[in-house]
Every structure is written in structure tokens, then in C-alpha cells.
């Protein structure tokens, strides 16, 4: 299907490099005829990789620190001018925990780092929505998506304080989803994505083992960044007009599993090997 987003305009946060989920979303939205402004933290711009994406998709880049209300206001104003009027979609694809990055255990968190990670990963979503609200930047039936992870509902020890940030992020989608729904029929959802090899993902301790575990647990296998991009296209389109205030699992079935044959086989083989070893 082509042209699903023809005539739609938006902002895509968080494309750092070609592995970023936001990068895949930008490519998929472009392929479906959507137009957008790309944005990322000024510090991320230094890597410069986003320029190639901007060129390929014919997009303008407007840097913004998503924790800065001033930057966000300038971004929305810039996007409205660049794209010629109201916006139809926004992707929030932003996450960072200093505690995770520095390997701080959940039972020994540094609270200044916690506050920073919470602001970047969760409160920024509220700031994005509030900036759009104040400028009345979103069109009726607009669609806003943020990316989450199942550690918001279940315990994943090495995800540390990011688990709490994701729970907060998902709650914002529900709370703001009510107000924006009432005001302009704007939809606000989160996608809970499978572990995906990206800069942010690979920062989590034991990520390689974990991605294999999730693959073995999921009947459909892990959802890729490209899969996530297709779901975003669907949510941005007019095909999902009354899906709002939801957390949608894009995880190959992982979230509904207890145990799988593939995971059991690993433990059975290990048990058999142990039994055969000379005592
Ligand atoms: N990779 C995974 O396994 C996985 C799984 C589930 C959910 N997610 C979520 O997907 C989203 C995107 O992450 P990704 O995996 O594509 O990694 P990524 O590292 O490519 O993207 C994270 C982005 O956040 C941006 N960012 C950080 N601080 C910012 C700030 N102050 N202002 C603006 N932007 C800022 C970074 O520059 C980067 O572009 C995150 O919310 C992440 O938690 C990732």
C-alpha cells in the first residue's frame, strides 16, 4: 500500500543513526508520502549522521533538547512554518538513563542521574505534548506515538530506573490522551517494542543475551525497527482513528508468553549435560 500518509505532516524525534527506530520510522513515513521535520538533541547533531536522512527524505532538521520548553516551542513554531500549517503526527523516540549507562544498580541509584533520565525519557513526552497544545499545533485526528518497553509492566532487573521512566511515559499517554482527545480528537499511544539493536538498546547490561532470550520466547520472533516503523505508519494514518490512550505491544507475542519450547530446550539440554558430566 502506498501513499497512506499522503498530505500528512509531522515531527520525528530521535533519529541518531541508521539503527535508530526513529530513522526507520522516518524512512517508512517518507515512503508513504508523509512530510516531516527531523529533530534531535543539539549534542546528537554533532555526529552529523542525521544529515543523510534529511537529504534522502527531503526534510529540514531543527535541533531541540526535548527537556527544554524553549527549544520545543521554537521547534513547533519552526515545523509549522516549514510544513505550512498544522501537524498530523509526532513520534517521540527518546530514551536515556544515566544510571543504566553508568551501570548503577537499581538498589544504589544516583538520584540526580535518575532525575535527568526521567526528564529526558518521560517528562519530555509531556513537554512535547504541552508545547503542541499551547501552540495548537496538531490538526484534528492527529496522532502522537512514543516508544516504550515491557519493563513498564514486568520486572527486568538490568533495565533499572528506565523501567519506572517507561511506566511514567505510558501514563502520560493516557492522561494527555484524554485531554487531547476531548479537545481535538488527537490520538496518543505508546508502542512497547521488542529489544532492538540500537545505541540506546545496546547500553543495557546483558543486551545480547537478552535479545536472544526474547527471540526464543516470542512465537513470531522479535519485532524489528522496521516492524515498529510500519506500526507507526498505521497509527499515524486514518486507518486507526479510534485507537488512543493505548500501550500497543509490538513484540511478536512476548508479552503474553509464560515459557516457550525453545527456552525450555535450552534448560533441558543444560540439565542433560549436567547429568552426563562425570561426578
Ligand atoms: N532499542 C530497544 O531495545 C528499545 C526497546 C523498546 C523501546 N525502545 C525505545 O525506543 C526509543 C528510541 O530508542 P532507540 O532504541 O531507537 O535508540 P537511539 O539511541 O537510536 O535513540 C534514542 C534517541 O534519544 C535521543 N535523545 C536523548 N536525549 C535527548 C534529549 N535531551 N532531547 C532530544 N533527544 C534526545 C538520542 O539523541 C537518540 O536519538 C527510546 O524511547 C527507547 O527507550 C528501545
Image (cartoon, helix red, strand yellow):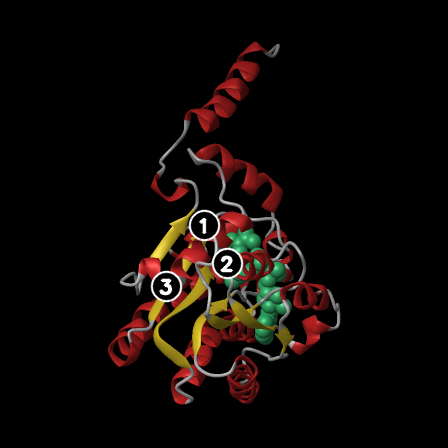
Q: Quadrant of ligand 1?
A: bottom right
The location of residue 226, given as percent across then percent down, is 54, 49
Q: Quadrant of the C terminus?
A: top right
Which residue is under mark 3?
A: 189
Q: Is mark 3 within 8 Å of ligand 1?
A: no
Which of the numbered marks, if any, corresponds to residue 201?
none
189 vs 263, left or right, is left
Q: Are marks 3 and 2 in contact (CB under 8 Å)?
A: no
**Residue under the point 49% across and 32% down:** 216
Structural crowding at the residue carrying mark 1, measured as other residues with C-alpha within 10 Å and reported as few (<14), some (14–19) or many (≥20): few
The location of residue 104, given as percent across then percent down, is 59, 60
Which residue is under mark 2?
A: 32
7 vs 187, left or right, is right
Which residue is under mark 1?
A: 1
From what the image shows, is residue 257 above or below residue 149? above
**Residue under the point 51% across and 62% down:** 33
Mark 2 vs 1, N-terminal side: 1
**Residue under the point 67% across and 60% down:** 17
Amino acid at each position: 500500500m502506498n501513499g497512506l500518509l499522503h498530505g500528512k505532516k509531522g515531527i520525528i524525534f530521535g533519529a541518531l543513526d541508521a539503527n535508530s527506530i526513529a530513522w526507520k520510522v522516518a524512512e517508512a513515513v517518507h515512503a508513504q508520502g508523509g512530510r516531516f521535520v527531523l529533530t534531535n538533541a543539539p549534542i546528537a547533531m554533532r555526529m552529523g549522521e542525521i544529515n543523510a536522512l534529511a537529504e534522502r527524505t527531503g526534510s529540514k532538521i531543527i535541533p531541540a533538547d526535548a527537556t527544554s520548553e524553549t527549544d520545543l516551542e521554537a521547534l513547533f513554531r519552526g515545523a509549522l512554518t516549514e510544513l505550512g500549517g498544522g501537524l498530523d503526527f509526532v513520534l517521540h523516540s527518546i530514551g536515556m538513563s544515566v544510571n543504566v549507562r553508568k551501570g548503577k544498580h537499581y538498589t544504589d541509584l544516583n538520584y540526580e542521574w535518575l532525575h535527568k533520565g526521567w526528564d529526558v525519557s518521560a517528562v519530555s513526552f509531556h513537554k512535547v505534548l504541552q508545547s503542541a497544545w499551547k501552540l495548537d499545533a496538531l490538526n484534528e485526528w492527529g496522532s502522537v506515538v512514543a516508544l516504550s518497553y515491557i519493563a513498564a509492566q514486568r520486572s527486568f532487573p538490568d533495565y533499572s530506573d528506565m523501567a519506572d521512566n517507561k511506566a511514567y511515559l505510558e501514563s502520560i499517554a493516557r492522561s494527555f490522551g484524554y485531554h487531547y482527545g476531548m479537545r481535538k480528537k488527537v490520538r496518543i499511544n505508546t508502542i512497547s517494542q521488542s529489544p532492538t539493536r540500537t545505541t540506546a538498546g545496546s547500553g543495557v547490561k546483558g543486551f545480547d543475551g537478552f535479545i536472544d532470550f526474547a527471540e526464543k520466547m516470542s512465537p513470531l520472533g522479535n519485532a524489528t525497527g522496521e516492524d515498529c516503523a510500519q506500526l507507526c505508519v498505521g497509527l499515524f494514518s486514518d486507518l486507526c482513528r479510534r485507537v488512543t490512550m493505548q500501550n500497543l505491544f509490538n513484540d511478536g507475542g512476548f508479552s503474553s508468553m509464560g515459557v516457550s519450547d525453545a527456552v525450555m530446550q535450552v534448560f533441558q539440554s543444560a540439565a542433560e549435560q549436567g547429568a552426563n558430566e562425570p561426578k
